[in-house]
Amino acid sequence: MTNSNYDIVIGLEIHAELNTKTKVFCGCQNKFGQEPNSNCCPVCVGMPGALPVLNKEALKLAIKAGLACDCKINDYAVFERKNYFYPDLSKAYQISQLVKPICIGGFIELESGKKIRLNRIHLEEDAGKLTHQLNDTHIDYNRGGVPLIECVTEPDISSADEALEFLQKLRNRFIFADIAHCKMEQGGMRCDVNLSIKPKGSTVFGTRTEMKNLNSFKSVAHAIEYEAKRQIEEIEKGNKIIQETRKWDDDSGISSSMRSKEDSQDYRYFPDPDLLTIEVEPSVVESIRSNMPLLQEQRIQIYSEEYNLPTSDINILVNSKLVSDYFDNAVKLLNEPKEIANWIITELLKQDVSEKMPISEQKFTQIINLSLTKKITRSNAKILLENIIQTNADVMETAKQLEMLGDISKEDIESIVINLISENEKAVADYEKTPDKVVQFFIGNVMKQTKGRANAAMARDIIIAKLQNK
Ligand code: ADP
Ligand code: MG
Ligand code: ZN
């Protein structure tokens, strides 16, 4: 990257808010975008005497995160108090895990085959949110006590590109396994970057800095490039790197020293006397494992190997969990993956699908099936789909109302075909030479005369029978 005489060494610490209904140690809602300080109680703001009770759902999601990253799940885990004062933490300690985290080890493999090892994933609580304004700072404690997992990597990452690929893969696993929504713009996923440099090929690590406040993948990449360059310049000038925490400023594109780096001793961690040791039953881990939704990589494999979908379609489908889940559900209802993928990509993704799909899987596959079985024409099926998306009405009722269903009798089609044959001598004469074209011509005319209500497969059979008898 910046200078080929140096290796860059990066370790990431990623925080993700878990998809639970309530907070990790109290009954308050875990919900973004509420009126500030409307969603707090004595437990999550740390009033004296209030007692935390562990939310089992949060523990399950932390275990699930470990399983999604091939971690070992410890058979017990201990909550500890991490003591520090900051206005967003009214208790003056954060409940976290240090010596006995819930998950240890694990890895994520990059496309290159390189494995980025995880050191641990532990469960903790989020702090409140400070908003700095011109002359004052506002505090919202709604986020305090929201369940968080912290994933810590080993210092295995060597570039901004590798960091981004790792983050993208981690994020996709959490999203596809319903562990965390990871919306970075809502602070649902946050990342600290630890970075050092060393002479190329050296086995001795340099002194690292830690950068905080990285709110998007773009700022992670930007901050890595900036910090690597800064450290190399310092070393080249003969200066030493100071171990410190630095704050990244997205607007100016520079980082600045925030405080000298503290280590775990500074936090006076000790086991939280209010919380019991977590005992993890192997049967609980097994049940979480067996109910694990398919991860993005597994879906890509099925779509490619079982359904033979083209890579371009696969990429579109797995780009969103919502779309991918919808596709999977639709295929369960109607075993026509290629057809369903086409209809989703060409018809449904025209709509805004950021929050939800515009039509239920049942109605969607019902319409596709009407088209596949030639009960309605393909173009009518598209019109029907648009209509149901607007009205959410019953599919068969609407098809009937729009006079799309093939309710024209065999006899009616026969008499239309007889008429057409007598009126189109030239087409009949061309049948020997270009049979497909001529049959298509007659089908088109039958459809025109019946306003698309004839069963096209039936019309085809009748047309061919009549033409061959000529
Ligand atoms: P602390 O307890 O001080 O936070 P950790 O050992 O937990 O330190 O490491 C925090 C992060 O820093 C980890 O992601 C780790 O991989 C990374 N890290 C440790 N040493 C270095 C280094 N020399 N250069 C870059 N990253 C490092
Ligand atoms: Mg740490
Ligand atoms: Zn609360």
Image (tube, rainbow, N blue to C red):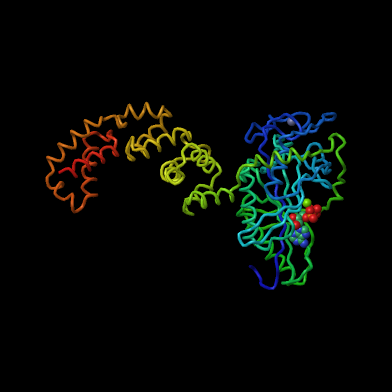
Residue at x-position 32% and y-position 31%: 405
Quarter of the image containing the C terminus? top left
Where, by quadrant of the figure, is residue 230 drawn? bottom right
Where, by quadrant of the figure, is residue 347 drawn? top left
Q: Residue furthest front?
A: 469
The relative height of residue 46 versus residue 424 in the rendered view (above or below) is: above
Query: Is residue 351 something that shows in the picture?
Result: yes
Residue at x-position 19% and y-position 40%: 466
Give the side of residue 446 with respect to residue 224, left or right.
Answer: left
Rendered-image quarter of ligand 1: bottom right
Q: Position of residue 61 (x, y in %)?
A: 70, 40
Give the side of residue 168 with respect to residue 85, left or right.
Answer: left
Quarter of the image containing the N terminus? bottom right
Query: Is residue 209 something that shows in the picture?
Result: no
Q: Position of residue 299 (x, y in %)?
A: 56, 48
Q: Position of residue 457 (x, y in %)?
A: 30, 39
Where, by quadrant of the figure, is residue 132 drawn? top right
Q: Position of residue 225 (x, y in %)?
A: 65, 62
Q: Camera-side residue: 343 or 185?
A: 343
Q: Tag count in the figure?
A: 0
Q: Camera-side residue: 383 or 336?
A: 336
Q: Camera-side residue: 51 or 254?
A: 51
